Image (spheres, rainbow, N blue to C red):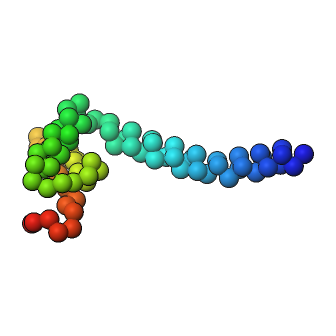
Amino acid sequence: MKLLEFLKRERKKSAPVAKERLQIIVAHQRSQRGRPDYMPMLERELLEVIRRYVQVDDDAININLDSEDNCSVLELNVTLPKGSPG
């Protein structure tokens, strides 16, 4: 009987964690909607070019594409390691 109580208790604790993970996945998918197909490849290529000069992690680059009216703005943010020139 204690085993059943233990299993029930674990489910209750894992539900908020699962809900939070699902919210993160949904938010990520929503952010990807309307994003051009070439964006993942563009991110990889930009990261390769940046790495020619400075060693950065894969998650150190963030690219956003915003469109308003007839204008598109590509925003590139790169987190450089400490001690790098710049």
Tell me which corner region of the image, top left, top right, bottom left or bottom right, holds residue 72: top left
Left or right: where does residue 74 sit relative to residue 58?
left
Tell me which corner region of the image, top left, top right, bottom left or bottom right, holds residue 45: top left
Left or right: where does residue 6 sit relative to residue 11?
right
Residue at 20%, 40% (x, y): give it. Answer: 44
Is residue 70 visible in the rendered image? The answer is yes
Tally of marks? 0
Relative height, residue 36 to residue 11 (above, below): above
Q: Quadrant of the N terminus?
A: top right
Is residue 68 visible in the rendered image? The answer is no
Viewer-side residue, 9 vs 69: 9
Residue at 24%, 36% (x, y): give it. Answer: 40
Residue at 77%, 45% (x, y): give it. Answer: 7
Residue that protrudes farthest toward the right in the picture: 1
Q: Quadrant of the C terminus?
A: bottom left
Q: Could you say where residue 37 lies in the image, as x and y percent from the top left?
A: 23, 30
Residue at 57%, 47% (x, y): give it. Answer: 19
Q: Could you say where residue 17 lies in the image, as x and y percent from the top left?
A: 58, 50
Viewer-side residue, 66 vs 43: 43
Residue that protrudes farthest toward the bottom in the picture: 83
Left or right: where does residue 11 sit relative to residue 66?
right
Q: Could you say where residue 42 lies in the image, as x and y percent from the top left?
A: 17, 38
